[in-house]
Image: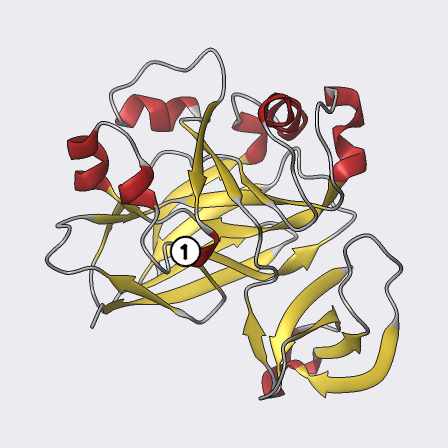
């Protein structure tokens, strides 16, 4: 099932996306889909007639650094023995088609980072790896946009990862997917920049959930970013960047200068 958050010009609602290509439509849901049965309202719209939003606004985004060996290598770092955790604020989230705003004057290099995002479906803590699938609601595409020069300058990652619009998510949440071996790709202006498979993760999704929930409680709608493969590179104002993940769809955003 594909679950989107969308607007027709009024209050955002959730809906299920059905069909393919030009024949896609979205059926509105009553309430939110986390922690309850999905109930349709009967309202139905062509997908082309609605504005897709970020599929959720999480209480927190827990991200994992250097979780592909080739990306750790391109950063000049050793492969970490344990997952490297950092946080991105909820205010960094934007949806498909929204602008990534380049903070001109504050940074000289903003990079794309294509990632598989895990959406948590229930309150959970201290989850053993074998029970991790029970707390997963679904998956979506993510772009962990990063001010690379600030990351290097600060010696830690908070400022570089936290600018408004630096966490595009979408286009929707896909449930019932085996995410252990999906193709992931980033393109900029149609040029392929990153390609990998999620089977190349140093720490897989279940291991990450177990590790993170030893530290903090995860809430319904929280997002876990699983890391980016090699090929990260700079974005310029005017670029169109897309993250595509097999079975999940494509997330596209344009880069604009921040006012």
199 and 173: which one is in front?
173
Q: Is residue 216 visible?
A: yes
Report which residue position mark 1 lands on: 92
Expressed as whole percent of the image width and height from the top left, the position of residue 191 reads: 32, 56
Q: Residue at x 78, y 60 (%)?
A: 33
Based on the displayed image, in which of its 4 quarters is residue 117 positioned?
top right
Left or right side of 6 for 33 = right
Q: Is 212 in front, or is 44?
A: 212
Q: Which quadrant of the figure contains the C terminus?
A: bottom left
Q: Dot 1, crowdedness within 10 Å: few (<14), some or many (≥20)? A: many
Residue at (40% x, 46% y) in the render: 144
Q: Is residue 2 left or right of residue 203?
A: right
Residue drawn at (36%, 34%), measured in percent from left and top?
Answer: 230
Image: 46 above or below 183: below
Q: Secondary structure at mark 1?
A: helix
**In the rendered view, would you say 241 is above or below 77?**
below
Left or right: where 230 falls relative to 103: right
Figure check: 108 above or below 125: below
Q: Quadrant of residue 153?
A: top left
Quadrant (top left, top right, bottom left, bottom right) of the N terminus: bottom right
Quarter residue 118 falls in? top right
Closer to the camera in the image, 131 or 12: 12
* Colouring: secondary structure
**In-front residue for pair 138/158:** 158
Q: Farthest residue in the top direction?
A: 81
Number of disc labels: 1
| 6 displayed left or right of 162 | right
Image spot of residue 221 (x, y percent):
66, 51
Q: Position of residue 154 (x, y in %)?
A: 19, 32
Residue 65 percent location from the top left of the image: 41, 29
Residue 232: tell me if it is visible.
no
């Amino acid at each position: 099932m594909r679950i989107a958050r969308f607007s027709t010009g009024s209050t955002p609602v959730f809906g299920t996306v059905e069909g393919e290509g030009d024949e896609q439509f979205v059926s509105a849901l009553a309430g939110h889909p986390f922690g309850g049965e999905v109930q349709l309202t009967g309202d139905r719209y062509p997908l082309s007639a609605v504005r897709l939003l970020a599929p959720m606004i999480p209480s927190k985004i827990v991200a994992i650094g250097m979780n592909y060996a080739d990306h750790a290598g391109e950063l000049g770092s050793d492969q970490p023995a344990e997952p490297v955790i950092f946080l991105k604020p909820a205010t960094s989230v934007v949806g498909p088609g929204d602008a990534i705003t380049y903070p001109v004057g504050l940074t000289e290099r903003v990079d794309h980072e294509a990632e598989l995002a895990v959406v948590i479906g229930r309150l959970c803590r201290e989850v053993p790896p074998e029970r991790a699938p029970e707390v997963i609601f679904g998956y979506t595409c993510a772009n962990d946009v990063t001010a690379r020069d600030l990351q290097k300058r600060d010696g830690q990652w908070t400022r570089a990862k936290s600018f408004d619009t630096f966490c595009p998510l979408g286009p929707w949440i896909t449930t019932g997917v085996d995410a252990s071996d999906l193709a992931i790709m980033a393109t900029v202006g149609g040029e392929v920049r990153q390609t990998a498979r999620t089977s190349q993760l140093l720490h897989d999704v279940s291991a990450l959930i177990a590790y993170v929930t030893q530290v903090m409680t995860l809430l319904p709608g929280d997002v876990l970013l699983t890391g980016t493969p090699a090929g990260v590179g700079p974005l310029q104002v005017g670029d169109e960047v897309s993250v595509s993940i097999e079975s999940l769809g494509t997330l596209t955003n344009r880069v604009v200068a921040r006012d």
